[in-house]
Image (cartoon, grey):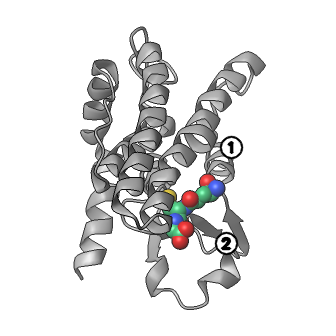
């Protein structure tokens, strides 16, 4: 049994869905209800995964650990294939996720309305530019890592929702929209959303 510390709708959701995809039992713990959470992660951020005595932080590291442990790491006998997967994973985790992070920062750090809206608009334009890269890839590939839905697509589906939290208009592209619709229909993703919502409602 794994324990996953999460916030509703946060990047932890993709790991939650991955655990369902891998058929792993998981207990989810809302970070805000967990006393002493900073003892687990000094940054105070989710995701944190507990696997018996092992405490893992950083989303990409957790994903690679789970894929490796459950024999699902793409390109295990093919360094080029693995590098291609890692590139997509890191693009999501280390490029697109922080680009959305600017929106959260602006909302907190800039109080003057006009300056805040200008900053939101600039940040949204940079995010949109990143989605054009994803959209171009998806013009010739069903999913970001090839013909099969992967955790990277689920990460992108989580981030795409964040734009709606701010007064910005971020165009995702038709191929991205098509991919996201498939992720939203994916049973493991749907179960992660439902489990988080059920816990929040309890
Ligand atoms: N580099 C970290 C970033 C994690 C991160 O940004 N987590 C966000 C949720 S998506 C968070 O916990 N935000 C709440 C906070 O910072 O207090 C990772 O990839 O795990």
Q: Ligand 1, what quadrant?
A: bottom right
Foreground residue, 54 or 141?
A: 141
Q: Please rate how many residues cluster around mark 1, counting C-alpha atoms within 10 Å: few if below 14, some from 14 to 19, many from 20.
A: few
Tell me where residue 54 sits by quadrant.
bottom right
The reply to whether callout 1 and callout 2 are in contact (CB within 8 Å) is no
Distance from the alpha carbon under mark 1 to that under mark 2: 25 Å
Q: Is residue 182 above or below residue 81?
A: below
Give the percent coordinates (x, y) of residue 176.
34, 25
The answer to whether any part of residue 133 appears in the image is yes
Q: Residue at x 61, y 75 (%)?
A: 44
Above/below status of 115 relative to 129 = below
Question: Which one is closest to the eye, mark 1 or mark 2?
Answer: 2
> Pointer 1: what residue?
68
| Quarter in which the N terminus is drawn | bottom right
Give the structural element (helix, strand or loop) at label 1.
Answer: helix
Q: Is mark 2 within 8 Å of ligand 1?
A: yes
Image coords of residue 138 (percent x, y):
41, 17
Residue receiving disc 2:
43
Residue found farthest to the top: 140
């Amino acid at each position: 049994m794994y324990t996953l510390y999460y916030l509703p709708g946060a990047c932890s959701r993709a790991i939650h869905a991955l655990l369902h995809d891998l058929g792993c039992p998981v207990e989810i713990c809302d970070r805000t209800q967990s006393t002493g959470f900073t003892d687990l992660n000094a940054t105070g951020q989710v995701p944190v995964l507990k696997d018996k005595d092992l405490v893992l932080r950083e989303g990409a590291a957790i994903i690679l650990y789970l894929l490796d442990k459950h024999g699902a790491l793409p390109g295990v006998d093919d360094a080029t294939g693995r590098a291609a997967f890692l590139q997509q994973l890191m693009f999501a985790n280390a490029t697109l996720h922080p680009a959305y992070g600017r929106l959260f920062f602006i909302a907190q750090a800039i109080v003057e309305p006009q300056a805040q809206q200008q900053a939101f608009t600039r940040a949204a334009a940079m995010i949109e530019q990143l989605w054009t890269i994803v959209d171009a890839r998806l013009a010739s590939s069903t999913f970001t890592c090839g013909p099969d839905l992967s955790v990277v697509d689920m990460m992108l589906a989580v981030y795409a929702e964040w734009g709606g939290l701010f007064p910005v208009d971020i165009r995702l592209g038709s191929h991205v929209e098509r991919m996201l619709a498939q992720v939203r229909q994916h049973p493991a993703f749907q179960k992660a959303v439902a489990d988080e919502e059920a816990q929040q409602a309890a």
